[in-house]
Amino acid sequence: MSHKTAKHWINGCFVEEGPVNPSINPATGQEIGHYHDGGADVARLAINAAAETFRKSSWRLDAMNRATALSHLADRYNDCLDEIINSVCTENGKMRREAEYEASHIARCLRFSAGLAVQNFGRVTDVKPGTQSLSIRQPIGVAGLIIPWNSPGYLMVRALAPALAAGCTAVIKMPSQAAQTAAIAMEIIAGIPEIPAGAVNIFVETGSEGAKFLVDAPNVPVIHFTGSTSTGRNIAKAGATHLKRVGLELGGKTPHLIFDDADLEAVLPVLEKSATVFAGQFCMTGSRVLVQRGIAESVTKALAARLEKVRPGPSSDPSSDMGPLIDKASVQRVDAMVEDAIRSGAVPIVRGGPSTTAALSGGAFYHPTLLQVPSSNMPIVQEEIFGPVQTLQIFDTEDDAIALANDTEYGLSACVWSRDVDRPLRIARLLDAGLVSINSWANLAVEIEEGGFKSSGLGRLGGMGAMDDFLETKQISQTFKHA
């Protein structure tokens, strides 16, 4: 497939609506294509199509057809894997190995959801002689899915697959930074005959007018959003007007708890990558390094040496270790946070910062930064950075480590590093985090529920629980003659 100008996919047709804007490669600043920029009018068309298809087609009633559609989607995505990977590298700035990792989850998620589509999660019980009660689950209606730009290939599918498995129809808002990747998804979906026109609708948008229309629409009973906590709060408030089901996966401040008995040969390369994968533009970026005093000096020196050697560059250059931020405005934003932290007392162990390499001047490159901080109260510790910046703090006891780890409003993920048999599980149970990776980082499984504690979100995607937001539960009671 070749995409020069990405369109919208509405009611089974490609729609050219809205001004045409350029898609930009963040590693070079060069145009790689164009897209039609949607808004409220396109969102309205998409919602009407999804609502009509939900009411009039057999999609919500035919579980086997949905399972077949999801299975065929998985096959088609596998056929297009190289194209998706290339698009994510070019449009998103990811290293090829990172794009390959993202894309590897897509078919797996679709196949898992295909199995969920034909499962009957209801039950039947005889509540008394002559009375039978049934609990059935049925699709809630149109699902509004608002997708972020940082992992657009997989995160779109992660939300869409369970929505379709449940029998919902969907309206998907894709960000303009992922317009070319969205166009590939549209063509893949267009090629699946089991999906009726209007069951899946996708529009691309730079701003938020279409997304706001989706959130406010009374005939869209469920919204799922992945993105910033501040936007998630606004969506939850707006959705409350119509008592919408709202699923939110929001920001994170993943801490690494590194104990004296940790295997440092295993820790250090993962510690580095947890800050530089996706250039730190990941909700589970390992932005907080908490290290026990006995090994603090050695970990600090070794991590600093590794971060100083990281080479930012485009994915097209095999010598690149880390890609760009999504745009130059993000470079300025991240650097301003770092400068503010230094003025407030943070000690720069590795200063990093905007790249001054002439060959990279067209791109949005930022060198990794490591700051030792005197307090958890600093904004650099409390706020999501979305860049390759880590803070370092020292602790003495397990209780100290747990208190530091939990001392933010976020609770998406955490990591525990220790060779002790009991300690990791003991600590994992006390951490406010939806995912705890033991002697690893961001160790996600498609087949297990994923989501956050506290201000990191509501609801779960992944696993059997992924369908919960997209299903209503209904009790049916029947009285019959008892023999």
Image: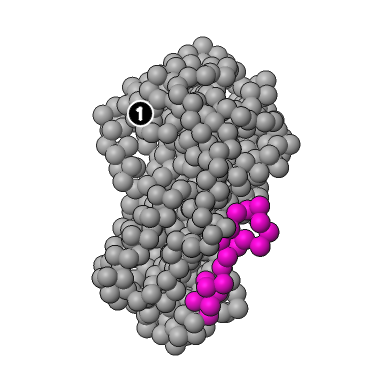
Q: Secondary structure at mark 1?
A: helix
User: Which residue sits furthest right?
Assistant: 79
Query: For this view, does 238 lie left or right of residue 162?
Result: left
User: Which residue sits furthest top?
Assistant: 56
Q: Which residue is mark 1?
A: 209
Where is residue 430? Give x, y as percent.
39, 67
Residue 410 sits in quarter: bottom left
Q: Which residues are magenta?
A: 302-321
Q: Nearer the viewer, residue 439 or 48?
A: 48
**Residue 110 in view of the camera:** yes
Residue 115, placed above or below residue 345: above
The N terminus - image quarter: top right
Residue 454 sits in quarter: bottom left
Residue at horizontal 48 percent and vertical 53 percent from the top: 364
Q: Is residue 310 magenta?
A: yes
Residue 24, placed above or below residue 18: below
Query: For this view, does 2 lie left or right of residue 270?
Result: right
Where is residue 328? Give x, y as percent.
44, 50
Q: How many marks?
A: 1
Where is residue 464? Give x, y as percent.
54, 42
Q: Specify few, some or many for label 1: CA neighbours under 10 Å numbering under 14, 14-19, or 20 or more.
A: some
Where is residue 368? Give x, y as percent.
48, 66
What secondary structure predominates along the stretch shown in magenta?
loop
Q: Nearer the viewer, residue 401 or 93?
A: 93
Label 1 sits on what residue type?
Glu
Residue at horizontal 39 percent and vertical 65 percent from the top: 431
Q: Which color scheme is applied?
A: one colour
Residue 121, placed above or below residue 12: below
Residue 462, placed above or below residue 369: above
Residue at horizontal 41 percent and vertical 51 percent from the top: 330
Residue at horizontal 55 percent and vertical 50 percent from the top: 27
